[in-house]
Amino acid sequence: MTATAFTQNTATLVPAHWPGISLDELNAKAAMQTRVDRKYIVDGLYAAAVLSNLPADASVLEINGERDFAYDSVYFDTENLDSYKLAATGRRNRYKIRTHSYVDTGATFLEVKTEGARAVTVKERIPYPAADRAYLNAAGRDYVEESLRGLIDAPATAFEPILTTAYRRTTVLLPASEHNPVDSRMTIDTHLTW
């Protein structure tokens, strides 16, 4: 079964006058591997209104003239959906395991996200073979077990692919300001399927 949640084109959402920023520049200013996540689901008109009111010095990730990119993720969980249940009930020691593919470049990573103090998300990742993205190979299982040591009792062999998502993403850099104490990264996802 495939579901589609949002199909607005980001070209009509993100102000065209915002300058482009390279990936290296974006990562230097706001790598965001450790961060506080806030996620909102809004319709296209509301998103465009919010974006049009952001500071004029915002910039948009641009690679080879493109400003939105295709992503694909496969999430792994136990048969009992332990990871999902921890997140759904707001429990401590939450974790998320996924492969994350940057479709346009072919790069794939195995990522383990955990929640640290004060609801801070900590994302660690390793390069991963794209051909193996739908399962945990031996190196992937070792990485998961090492990353989650002390947090879970289940062996990495207990994790199976549970959910696959795909979407297009535009990434915006919001410079530090009076209302935004540090350079921040905001992502806008459209054409979501799972």
Image (cartoon, rainbow, N blue to C red):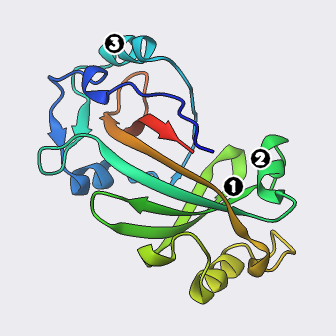
Q: What amino acid is at disc 1? A: Gly
**What label does residue 87 carry, if any?**
2
Indicate the position of residue 158 as horizontal and vertical percent values. 79, 75
Which tag, 2 or 1, sits closer to the chain's start?
2
Q: Secondary structure at mark 3?
A: loop
The amino acid pointed to by label 2 is Ala
Determine whether 92 is above or below 79 in the image.
Answer: above
Q: List the single residue furthest toward the front.
A: 1
Judged from the image, the secondary structure of the residue bearing numbered disc 2 is: helix
How much space separates mark 3 and mark 1, taking CA atoms? 32 Å
Question: Residue at (28%, 49%) from the top-left corner?
Answer: 26
Q: Is residue 159 visible?
A: yes
Which of the marked residues, 3 or 1, is nearer the chain's N terminus?
3
Disc marking residue 116: 1
Residue 151 as seen in the image, left or right of residue 5: right
Image point 54% across, 49% down: which residue?
165
- Tell me where residue 160 appears, x and y as whole percent: 72, 69
Q: Could you say where residue 1 lies in the image, as x and y percent from the top left?
A: 63, 45
**Image quarter of residue 191:** top left
- Label 3 amino acid? Asn
Report the residue that reaches farthest toward the bottom.
138
| Contact between labelled residues 1 and 2, with CB atoms less than 8 Å apart | no
Secondary structure category for the residue under label 1: loop
- Residue marked by disc 3: 53
